[in-house]
Amino acid sequence: MRKYLFIFSILLISCQEEITLDLSQVEDKLVVEGAIEPGFPPYVILTRNQGYFEPINQETYANLFVNDVDSVKVWYYNDNGEKEMKILQQIPGIDTLNLPPIYTDLNYTPNNYNFSQAGRTYYLEIQWNNQLITSETTIPEPTPLDSLWVEQSETADKDFKCDIRAVYSDPVDQQNNVLIRSKRLQHYENMDSLECKAENNPDLTLKLVDAGSDVLINGQAFETYFPRPKDNGFPTGKYNSYHTKECDNDSILEFSEDVVLIKFCQIDESSMKFWRSLVRQFGTNGNPFSEPMNLVSNINNGLGIWTGYGAVYYKVPIIKDTVINQEYSPEIIDIF
């Protein structure tokens, strides 16, 4: 009986047929990541899309960068109904850093830039590859937090781990949605396990913490907290206060506290739908049972997002029981 079963198994295996799937080619589309906020020039980062099954390596990564647009324009209509326009140009030399191209107003001067203001609607128009890509966004009025403070985490396994907490009162007469982003301006690590040395390893760019609709919070005051975003998914991390570590040579290594930049934003409805879908996508990252989710774009004839930020910034040193009472005045490097 075993012999017959063995022969039957061989017959089943020999009957297997290789199937080749003829996947359709992905339509070439422009991917836009653009933003504008008061006091700073608009900027647009441009790449192209890639098929899900296409390989990812250094060469294909570089091929995603879009350096050949015909034009990138941003404008609003003034009180007389006339267009006030900026022509965005690529920042020179950035391609040598293996970074995607950034298009912005190269005539920007700090402390004297009135093109970007809250309450205005800004229109984006990109000419590329015989295509017209458009979008629009409104910069809402910024709404500050009521209070912001640092406290020791109740759920962490180390006593130097801390949370950033806040109280926010949402205005009842303003249709606004909330977006929170953050980055560590200072973060010390022992980068080399063979060397007893603390090195500063800050975050290079702002990362997404959360996004929410005004419908859920309209007119309410509530307490919340801002977890540290992680590189590969939903933000659940903690921040480090000052702490020490004993090295193998019995010397004591000191780590200064993290310093965190919080960007607390009001955004319009179409922007909120994109950022909220991204939050949900992060929440299902790595879960094999989760339902695939497409990002909601506000780019016509393209993919991505064009967002107006009504932003308030806070610089937070991670020192237990520290209360932040003042807003932070960002420099242009802080908005990315």
Image: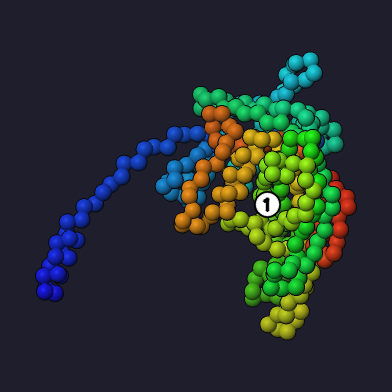
Q: For this rendering, which residue is in front, 224 or 323?
A: 224
Measuring 69% from the left and 44% from the top, which residue is drawn there? 216
Please indicate, yes or no, whether residue 335 appears anywhere in the rendered image.
Answer: no
Q: For this rendering, which residue is in front, 219 or 17?
A: 219
Q: Position of residue 62 (x, y in %)?
A: 52, 44
Position of the C terminus by quadrant: top right
Q: Does 82 appear above or below 102?
A: above
Q: Does 42 appear above or below 153?
A: above
Q: For this rendering, which residue is in front, 278 or 84?
A: 278
What is the total number of numbered labels drawn onto the structure image? 1
According to the picture, the residue beneath numbered tag 1 turns out to be 209
Dot 1, crowdedness within 10 Å: few (<14), some or many (≥20)?
many
Measuring 31% from the left and 45% from the top, which residue is drawn there? 21
Q: Position of residue 287 (x, y in %)?
A: 50, 57
Q: Quick one: SS at disc 1?
A: strand
Q: Quadrant of residue 107?
A: top right
Q: Amino acid at mark 1?
A: Val
* Residue farthest along the right direction in this orientation: 325
Q: Position of residue 136 (x, y in %)?
A: 65, 28
Position of the N terminus by quadrant: bottom left
Tell me if 31 is positioned left or right of 326 in this view: left
Measuring 51% from the left and 42% from the top, which residue is drawn there? 294
Q: For this rendering, which residue is in front, 327 or 212?
A: 212
Measuring 78% from the left and 45% from the top, which residue is drawn there? 220
Q: Quadrant of residue 71?
A: top right
Q: Position of residue 125 (x, y in %)?
A: 62, 26
Please indicate, yes or no, whether residue 170 appears anywhere in the rendered image.
Answer: yes
Tell me if 216 is positioned left or right of 119 in this view: left
Q: Does 295 appear above or below 238?
A: above
